[in-house]
Image (cartoon, helix red, strand yellow):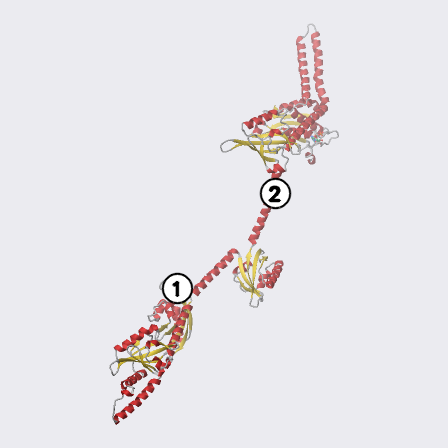
Amino acid sequence: MMPGQIAKFGNSAAQLLLGGLAALRSFGTGEKDRPAVGDDSRQDIRDLRDAVKQWREVFEHNPVMYFMVDPAGTVLNVNTFGAAQLGYTAAELTGQSVLNVFFEKDHDFVRQCVGLCLETVDQSHTWEIRKIRKDGSVLWVRENAKAMLRGDGTPVVLVACENITQRKEAEDALRQSEAYLAQAQELSRTGSFGLSPTTGEIFWSRETFRIFQCDPATQPNLGFVFQRIHPEDRDAVRKTLDRAFHEAEDFDHEYRLLMPDGSIKYLHSVARAVRRASGCVEFAGAVTDVTIAKETEQRLRRSEAYLAEAQRLSHTSSWAWDVRRQEFAYRSAELYRLFGFEPDQIDVPARAFQQRILADDFQRIADVERRAIHQGEPFEIDFRIARPDGSIRRVHTEGHPVKGRDGDVMEIIGTHVDVTEQFVAKQALQKAFDELKQSEQRFRDYAETASDWFWETGPDHRITRISEHADTASPVPTGLIGLTRWDLPPDAEFEPEKWEQHRAALDAHLPFRDLVYRGRDRNGSPIYVRTSGKPFHDENGSFLGYRGVSSDVTAAIRTEQAEDALRKAQAELAHVTRITTLGELTTSIAHEINQPLAAVISNADACIGWLGRAPADLDAARRSVEWIVEDANRASEVIRRIRALAKKTEIEMVPLDINQVVREVMALVRRELATHAVSVRMELASGLPNICGDRIQLQQVLINLVMNGIEAMQANVELPRELAIRSSRDGDGHLLLTVTDRGVGLDSDVTDRIFMPFFTTKSSGLGMGLSICRSIIEAHAGRLSAFPNEGSGATFQIALPFPHEAAS
Ligand code: ADP
């Protein structure tokens, strides 16, 4: 009972004493109060005195504290025991306010109690309250009090106090330990319960109420419990309880609650079966809310799944290596996959893994591992794995030694990352990079060695800028900033017209292209420069100068010049050869001329004869003269042709009737053919378009081929000496002219070489004829080729394009 609670109190030792005390008070204690009495009365008085003495003894030494307080709260009397309990003497307390032995904050309560007693005289009241000892310590008492009227009618309050400090402390301790238990239950989310299946009675601790979200004021029952249990778990729980009850055995199970808000709680419940004396089985147990643990476990499982997935995706595996056992303490599923095992082959020994590491690499790993264990330092190493399918995987691994309590490394934890793809990509990248570097170098070389350079001139046409490489390495002729293009070239004065035109174009701010001029390089050597440029303007359209590119075309120009020289030399050679051929033809030609000249002479003689007659036969004479003219013309024609052949003329490309060219040649070689008893068959296609060519050169080619054919048939005794000359057109729009003989023919090894200069099989041959013929035909955009005939002899074929078809 706490202060503030006053109860009516029934009969007790304290009450009895209070009664006694009241009796004593009514008798009085002082001698002066004694009335004059007789013997009987004296005896009575003696008895009374004894009684008073006894009662005083009882009063003073009864182990109950007695206080007598007046309505103002002043202590009128206190027994020795009571005063001693509070650390005072009775004299110290008597006359003092009773409030002094109470806590200040309890004073009102004390006044209230005294007041209540005074209002209800002769009625007992009881309450519990703290008192303060003289030394300041606390004393819990149960006070039993009642007001009585004294003889004079004034009230007095009699209080008997029982020391209940011990009980209070025990109660406090119990309350405290209950509080601790409740707190512990709350903290551990474990509630306790008692269950009597027979009666259906249930006892729950505060935490159990909280777990089941049940109002602690209500009485829980099994119906309510099952209502809370998740429907899916109800059967299982019922079975567990039934079995435990029937077998009177402990149970330990897990189930879920479906809470009113739809959330789920996971409970773990354990209970001990207790058989009562009545034979009934009861259970006392604990129920723990393991939701957090369950969810954490689920989260953990999920995060483990995520980790496994992440490892699979990132080709990363993790492991822990037990150094003492030389065995894995842990290895992730991905590690199995990396080494080519199935993740469910859990009993694969570490040795099997090690055997898949390439021997050289394994040795390195062992060294590194030894060092790491010795130094306790983390390490990184790359190695290769040979999988059973023959593939090689490259792995990058990182390991961290973990020390035990004794300071020795007991485990190494680490990761393996499959870097095969990165390795391949890196190699490809490296290769690409190397190639890029090479090509960059190549282009740098090209750029640095290129003869092109860029330049810029200002409005006054003086060079303002010139590209870097040209400025440093290459021999740039116009690399002098501040000069104009025509300040330097030595040909400026030789070709004034060209430069005038160029300067006019510049002044008109016109673009120019492929201006070639002579200059000098840094070393002073003459070079040819080709340059092009275009004007540039500012945003307002004002002319700022020219930008352009120049190149050193010396090599090209020199090549052109060399080609020119070669062409000239070839023409010279052709001429010389022609002359030589003509030399060879001299006899035939002489004969060709002599014959008409002889006819002229004889016809002249005849003419003279006809004229000398009388009368002169003028008709006959005219006929003779006409023959003379004809023959003379024939002779002069031959001479004209020979002269043309012998003349050194410039090449003249004109439209030509190839059949006509053939006929002209035949006129020249006719005698030669006859001399060598060679018959000629001409099969010239009619209606051929003209070709474009140089008459003399084509004649030269044809003469050459005919002469070679004659020579090839020189040795023919059995075979007829026959030369066929054919003109035709092929399907590709070419004129074909062939010279076919029946001579020695061409061996395959010779066919390739006959067009080479100086190749000859003749003792007096020059070996230049065919080579000149080919270059002449090629200069006509045609082709000269030779084939052995089916039977005997060889065929030489000239293919020339018809002009309009060549143009198409
Ligand atoms: P040359 O007549 O001075 O030898 P050519 O260049 O005209 O020079 O001929 C080169 C060589 O080609 C000849 O020596 C000969 O061996 C071969 N040749 C040329 N024409 C014929 C041909 N019609 N039949 C066989 N061989 C030939």
x, y percent for residue 308: 50, 59
Of 513 and 304, the residue lying toward us: 513
x, y percent for residue 209: 36, 69
x, y percent for residue 235: 38, 68
Local SS, label 2: helix
Q: Residue at x 32, y 88 (%)?
A: 53
Q: Is residue 790 left or right of residue 51?
A: right
Q: Quadrant of the N terminus?
A: bottom left
Q: Quadrant of the C terminus?
A: top right
Q: Amino acid at mark 2?
A: Gln
Categorize mark 1 by other alpha carbons within 10 Å: few (<14), some (14-19), many (20+).
some
From the image, tell me which residue sits under label 1: 264
Q: Residue at x 35, y 83 (%)?
A: 80
Q: Image quadrant of residue 447?
A: top right
Upstream in sequence: badge 1 or badge 2: 1
How far apart in space, not on screen, are marks 1 and 2 (Cα)?
72 Å
Local SS, label 1: strand
Q: Is residue 227 left or right of residue 639?
A: left
Q: Nearer the viewer, mark 1 or mark 2?
A: 2
Q: Is residue 261 left or right of residue 737?
A: left
Q: Is residue 735 visible?
A: no
Q: Is residue 33 above or below residue 646?
A: below
Of 2 and 308, the residue lying toward us: 2
Q: Which quadrant of the picture is home to ligand 1?
A: top right
Q: Is residue 357 visible?
A: yes
From the image, tell me which residue sits under label 2: 441
Categorize mark 2 by other alpha carbons within 10 Å: few (<14), some (14-19), many (20+).
few
Picture disc at residue 622: none
